[in-house]
Image (cartoon, rainbow, N blue to C red):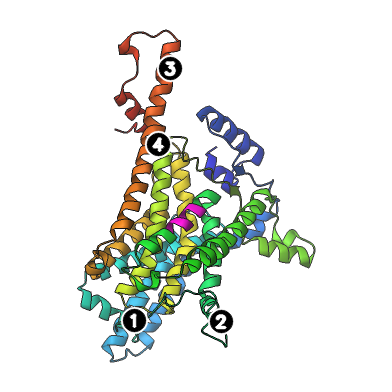
Amino acid sequence: CLIGETIRLHLCKPSTCQAAAKSLYSYSGLSLGSIVFPSKKSPNMSASLSLCRRAHTVTVLFILTCVLVYVTLLEETPQDTTFNTKRGIVASILVFLCFGVTQAKDGPFTRPHPAYWRFWLCVTVVYELFLIFILFQTVHDGRQFMKFIDPKLGVPLPERDYGGNCLVYDPGNKTDPFHNLWDKMDGFVPAHFLGWYIKTLMIRDWWMCMIISVMFEFLEYSLEHQLPNFSECWWDHWIMDVLLCNSLGIYCGMKTLGWLSMKPYQWQGLWSIPTYKGKIKRIAFQFTPYSWVNFEWKPASNLRRWLAVLGIIFMFLLAELNTFYLKFVLWMPPEHYLVLLRLVFFVNVGGVAMREIYDFMDDPKFHKKLGQQAWLVAAITVTEFLIVVKYDPNTIMLPIPFFVTQCWFLGIFLILSWTLWRFFIRRIRIEHNVWTVDGAQNVSQIPRISDHIQVYFPYF
């Protein structure tokens, strides 16, 4: 049995799949402790879901053809070039989405329906192509092109004061001395909480979430001379953001992960459930995972996993920064619906990307290449950053204060020093002591540095 697909699709008996998977995992030195297998499936389940699980390729093709025939033969084309251009672009995107939803390869997620995740995969391709198009325009043309999406865009943003008075209790204001605190209680407070709740469900690790949360606040401190909305009060950074909103979101996310890991995954066909309450419960559980995998990142176990975790943290922080810098360089106000759509987009594609990254990192022999969604999300993050660099290099190149530079150099130096000690010096000392205890006095028998490099990078 193939471990992943066989267990997920139940192409053989669950007991046989589990036994085969356990033997293969034990042979490769891996553990099944992080995998929660679904219970035995009801015999009526396949019959009740067969219609929903079909791709309906012929049906979609027939409907699409009927729509195109109607537009071609029965509808009169307007004599508005701008309207026809917009409608032609939208129609091209919709045709591509129809093709992708029915024909694209499935990813690791199957709930609530595989077509849902295929849809977001195609949206990821469309978004990346849009970013590439924006990247190849001049700065003026790229900003003015946003008017084709919304005529209100394409104008410079007004300057706003984000820091201001940082007194928690303002004695000068007799009416409401806590007005500074109430002014910060806006829509971004629940957005912070919800955002970190969802990020915790993606990353599935408390330490990584807290590190990213704290590191982003340091980035806001470091870059407040570039973007004015990074200039916040100290209590807004550490009390409202880190301690309240972010930490509460991470805590609720970890509680949800604990429930998902302990939940029994026993699925039954909807029409075989006798009670209406059971049917409603089954419909609600359709939006929960089909099975569960606990992410055990173990960054200190070997150099490959350590570098992978550092890369994940870096890409997360870069994607967070792109949210603010893209609004600044493309002249989009924070409350614009495109900003919200981008966040909704990353909510839907981020979980799939993290699962594919974890599979690729945890078992490279079985997952020989990076997943398609993870590849696209990484490309999107880099492309967004390149747009920022091209459209406003003056802001990006503003000199960082010397004290901030010293702090970042110190942090990078500590990370490099710990990496060198943990994965090279410490390992060499341990093996040298083992060789000495075993009586290996010949210097030629002691492993060389190149031998350790080949252990951690076997492909070189």
Gap between marks 4 and 2, in whole Å?
Answer: 53 Å
Residue at image position (28%, 67%) is: 388
Indicate the position of residue 133 as horizontal and vertical percent values: 26, 69
Amino acid marked by disc 1: Glu
Residue at image position (34%, 47%) is: 410
Say which label, 4 or 3, has the lower sequence index: 4
Label 3, on which residue? 433
> Is label 4 or label 2 in front?
2
Indicate the position of residue 314 as horizontal and vertical percent values: 38, 53
Gap between marks 4 and 1, in whole Å?
Answer: 46 Å
Q: Check whether the beta carbons of the residues at disc 4 and disc 2 lie within 8 A of each other.
A: no
User: Hey, which residue is sitting farthest right in the picture?
Assistant: 275
Provide the residue span drawn in magenta. Answer: 210-216
Say which label, 4 or 1, has the lower sequence index: 1
Q: Residues within 10 Å of mark 4 (few under 14, many from 20)?
A: some
Residue at image position (60%, 46%) is: 10
Q: Check whether the beta carbons of the residues at disc 2 and disc 1 lie within 8 A of each other.
A: no
Name the quadrant containing residue 112: bottom right
Say which label, 2 or 3, has the lower sequence index: 2
Q: Check whether the beta carbons of the residues at disc 4 and disc 3 lie within 8 A of each other.
A: no
Q: Quarter holding the N terminus?
A: top right
Q: Which mark is residue 303?
A: 4
Residue at image position (30%, 55%) is: 405
